[in-house]
Amino acid sequence: MSADHSHIRPWRHIERRKSRQIMVGNVPVGGDAPITVQSMTNTPTSDASATIDQIRRLEEAGADIVRVSCPDEDSTAAFRTIAREARVPLVADIHFHYKRGMEAAQAGAACLRINPGNIGSPDRVREVIQAAKDHGCSMRIGVNAGSLERELLEKYGEPCPDAMVESALNHARILQDHDFHEFKISVKASDPFLTVAAYQQLAEAIDCPLHLGVTEAGPLRTGTIKSAIGMGSMLWAGIGDTIRVSLAADPVEEIKVGFDILKSLGLRHRGVNIIACPSCARQGFNVIETVGILEEKLAHVTTPMSLSIIGCVVNGPGEALYTDVGFTGGGKGSGMVYLNGKTAHKLANEGMVDHIVELVEAKAAELDAARIAALEAAE
């Protein structure tokens, strides 16, 4: 993290690694583009209708890019219909059979993800490269600790950062030798220590965009924690251009967690950032229940903004100074509402949720209007 003293709060400034930019469909990845958030469908790709429905849910959650596995010919046949219906670029996930990559490129994939450890010979990789060139696809070299090439495992004895980076650079060289530079790289492991070490080494070795992820992180709670530790430490150090949180859960949860990680680091904002206390005997209302309801009722708000919900006056007024909307619990069944950091009015606990939702929606509309006006003035 850079100590840039020109920044208003230098301790919060993250200086991102400089990478070249590629395009995944119409979405820029790398360079000065926002860090994008991805997920992956888990429906049978051959069931185009089910896959499109899941992609729609991911789009509504804010996904920038969605990956779709293409394990067989039925999948790549359905991919054409799926790609036509999707509103975000699709990455075709290719393993074992290089022809699926060629078919997916023809069917409308914006990017082809290949795993060097199982795609096959250099000749087969070359054919996939040509298909990507012919159809305007970018590519991701996806190295996984669990599927490294046999010769690298023999050389190093076990999956390690050196082995993963060597695999990635070997295949990057093949792409570069064929004058193909529209690629990004991932070096994922289920062990966050191994993952972080590999990405740190890779970030020094090449200037292409990096796709971050702790693979096979686990179920929702523990997988979220492991992903936040691994990806959070890399993002804090300025490494990473696009992310995917790998959870054994509904893919929509991956998008939510991804945005929450970026939001926590100030790297990207979407929706309402709720600041809430854990509650204690001082609380003037049921904080936990209230926050749970508000989180659900405000899920539709995509405007970046902040809301503080604090149970008592110990920290409540101080937190409200820095949030767009705030509510602090008081006594006798009521609390205080703050707008733009200033005291606004008292509010009874009964009916507080609906009133806070109205205030947040109104503030979101105000912020959206101001942003549109600023854009129009700049044109």
Image: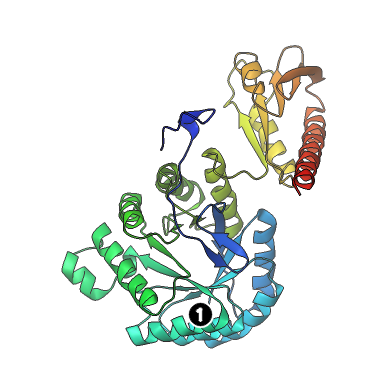
Could you tell me the amino acid type at mark 1? Answer: Ala
Against 273, is 287 above or below? above
Q: What element carries label 1?
A: helix
Against 359, is 69 above or below? below
Which quadrant of the figure has residue 324? top right
* Color encoding of the figure: rainbow
Residue positioned most to the front: 379
Q: Which residue is drawn at 70% across and 31% down?
A: 290
In the picture, measured across the screen, residue 54 lies left or right of residue 210, that is: right
Provide the residue designation for mark 1: 132
In the picture, measured across the screen, residue 177 lies left or right of residue 276, that is: left
In the picture, measured across the screen, residue 274 lies left or right of residue 178, that is: right
The quarter of the image holding the N terminus is top left
The x and y percentages for residue 345 are: 81, 17
Residue 244 visible here: no
The x and y percentages for residue 118 are: 36, 77
Against 122, is 351 above or below? above
Would you call the spot at circle 1 few (<14 residues within 10 Å), some (14-19), or many (20 or more)?
many
Q: Which residue is drawn at 80% across and 38% down?
A: 361
Residues 293 and 254: in front is: 254
Q: Residue at x 42, y 77 (%)?
A: 179
Which quadrant of the figure has residue 357? top right
The x and y percentages for residue 285 are: 70, 22
Residues 302 and 357: in front is: 302
